[in-house]
Amino acid sequence: RKLSTTMVCSDCCNLRHSNSLHQDLGGSLGRDAATGRGVLFGTEALLNEYGKSIAGQRFVVQGFGNVGSWAAQLISENGGKIVAVSDITGAIKNSKGINIPSLINHAKENGGIKGFNGGNAIDPNSILVEDCDILIPAALGGVINRENANDIKAKFIVEGANHPTDPEADEILSNKGVVILPDIYANSGGVTVSYFEWVQNIQGFMWEEDKVKAELKNYMTKGFKNVKEMCKTHNCDLRMGAFTLGVNRVARATLLRGWEA
């Protein structure tokens, strides 16, 4: 199997790849932003269910690597207000909204967000409980747990990282009425565009970046609707709906291909 050019680093690293690498070796335009863009599209789909949009919502982003920085940039471009951000070097807060392009430049030049003068420095351990409408954990797993779940103020959590919320916190947050968009769906933009990459490499035909973006939005929007239908069928939350949908699809494919025991 041809080695994907996107496998040189993880989605959560601080590198933003240039499109020229993909053009020279195969791959797909738009892959570097894909996971963060998927977070944007997933958040849009979720908010639409509640009659809301990205514009005017206050966001907190934990993690400012590939996923967090792209998500923050794209959300900001769509009218969302990023009020707090953290990475391994520190955390900053600005209730009026952080200038994300300036923060990205600062992080590139200084190896992290520490020292950025467009916000006040805060304790990184407080980032998850800062006042906001939407919390995006886009760093490590297990960061939302029974120790901090009760203090979370966000109305929505969009899981940009893998498994950032543990089961005990899930139950606490559910009882509080917090809606969680699960990682199995929310951060699937990257692997979706990796699928597009595979398709393009087989065809020997590279799509324009606008087509990649449009196809990703289509997949993310359709995927959310499918998850919601599963939730209605089984009267469950989004996490269980996503897992049920995924397992059902694998089981059906296994039967249709004659792989059952």
Image: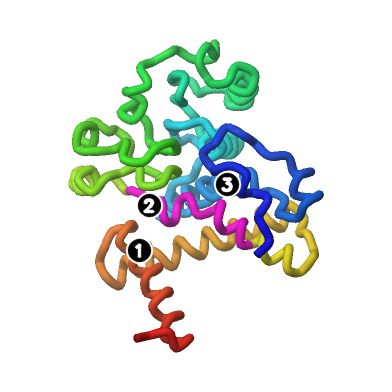
Q: Which residue is mark 1?
A: 243
What secondary structure is found at the residue carrying circle 3? helix
**Where's the N terminus, which quadrant?**
bottom right
On whether residue 191 falls in the magenta region, the answer is yes
Can residue 79 be seen from the camera position used here?
no
C-alpha separation, residue under disc 2 versus residue under disc 1: 9 Å
- Residue 129 position within the rendered picture, expressed as x and y whole percent measured from the top left: 30, 28
C-alpha separation, residue under disc 1 versus residue under disc 3: 22 Å
- Residue 137 position within the rendered picture, expressed as x and y whole percent measured from the top left: 40, 38
- Amino acid type at image mark 2: Pro
Q: Quadrant of residue 236?
A: bottom left
Q: Quadrant of residue 93?
A: top left
Total numbered circles? 3
Residue drawn where x is 38% and y is 78% of the image:
251
- Residue 101 position within the rendered picture, expressed as x and y whole percent measured from the top left: 63, 26
- Residue 31 position within the rendered picture, expressed as x and y whole percent measured from the top left: 65, 49
Can residue 53 be seen from the camera position used here?
yes
**Where's the C terminus, which quadrant?**
bottom left
Tell me the number on the disc at residue 182.
2
Q: Which residue is mark 3?
A: 37
Residue drawn where x is 59% and y is 39% of the image:
74
Residue drawn where x is 49% and y is 49% of the image:
44
CB-based contact (under 8 Å), mark 2 and mark 1:
yes
Q: Closer to the N terminus: mark 1 or mark 3?
A: 3
